[in-house]
Image: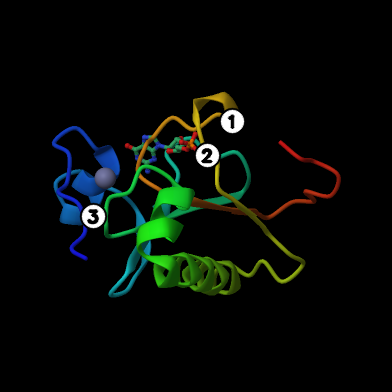
C-alpha cells in the first residue's frame, strides 16, 4: 500500500524533504532523527518515519515494520549520544496526551535521571 500524500502544512514532512532546517543526527531508508527544537532533557531527539501518518497507532496499522525501525533508530541514537544509563522512548498519541505535531514521532529522552518521571 503506498504511503499517504504529504500534507502541505506538516513541519516534519518539510524537515524530511529538506525544506525546513533541522539538526539531523540519523537517517536511514525508513526514518529520520533530529534534535527537538525545545528540548525537555539534555538529549532530546525525535525519530520520525519518512511516511506521513498522524500518530504511532496509524503507523502501526499501515506500516508495522516501520514502528520497529523507529525503535531501532531510537536505540542507535541513544548509543551514539552515550545514554548508557538508559533513556526514555515516548509516543504522545492524541492532543489530550500532549501531541502537537500530527506526524508520528518517537521522542528519545536522556542524559539525566528520568527515574520516576512519567511526564
Ligand atoms: P509532541 O508534543 O507532538 O509529542 O512533540 C512535538 C515536538 O516537536 C515538540 O517536542 C516540539 O518541541 C518539537 N518541534 C515542534 N516544531 C519543531 C521544529 O520545527 N523543529 C524541531 N526540531 N522540533 C520541533
Ligand atoms: Zn508529515
Which residue does the numbered mark 1 point to in the structure image?
Answer: 97
Q: Nearer the viewer, mark 2 or mark 3?
A: 2
Say which element carries label 3: helix
Front in this rendered view, residue 17 or 67: 67
Residue 17, position as x, y percentages in the image: 16, 54
Quadrant for residue 25, please give it.
bottom left
Query: Which residue occupies 35% across, 65% down?
Result: 31
Say which element carries label 1: helix
The answer to whether the residue labelled 2 contacts the one labelled 1, judged by CB atoms less than 8 Å apart, is yes
The answer to whether mark 3 is within 8 Å of ligand 2 is yes
| On screen, residue 31 above or below 91 | below
Asked whether the viewer can see residue 118, the reply is yes
Which residue does the numbered mark 3 point to in the structure image?
Answer: 16
Which residue does the numbered mark 2 point to in the structure image?
Answer: 93
For marks 2 and 3, give the CA distance. Answer: 21 Å
The answer to whether mark 1 is within 8 Å of ligand 1 is yes
Say which element carries label 2: loop
Residue 10, position as x, y percentages in the image: 24, 37
Characterize the local packing of mark 3: few (<14), some (14-19) or many (20 or more) Cα atoms within 10 angstroms. many
Characterize the local packing of mark 1: few (<14), some (14-19) or many (20 or more) Cα atoms within 10 angstroms. few
Q: Which mark, by number, is residue 43?
A: none
Please give the count of numbered marks on the rendered protein. 3
Amino acid at each position: 500500500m503506498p504511503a499517504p500524500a504529504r500534507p502541505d502544512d506538516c513541519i516534519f514532512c518539510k524537515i524530511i524533504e529538506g525544506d525546513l532546517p533541522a539538526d539531523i543526527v540519523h537517517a536511514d531508508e525508513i526514518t529520520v532523527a533530529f534534535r527537538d527544537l525545545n528540548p525537555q532533557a539534555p538529549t532530546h531527539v525525535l525519530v520520525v518515519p519518512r511516511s506521513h501518518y498522524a500518530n504511532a497507532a496509524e503507523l502501526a496499522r499501515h506500516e508495522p515494520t516501520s514502528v520497529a525501525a523507529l525503535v531501532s533508530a531510537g536505540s542507535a541514537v541513544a548509543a551514539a549520544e552515550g545514554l548508557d544509563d538508559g533513556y526514555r522512548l515516548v509516543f504522545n498519541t492524541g492532543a489530550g496526551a500532549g501531541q502537537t505535531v500530527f506526524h508520528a514521532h518517537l521522542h528519545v529522552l536522556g542524559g539525566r535521571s528520568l527515574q520516576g518521571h512519567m511526564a
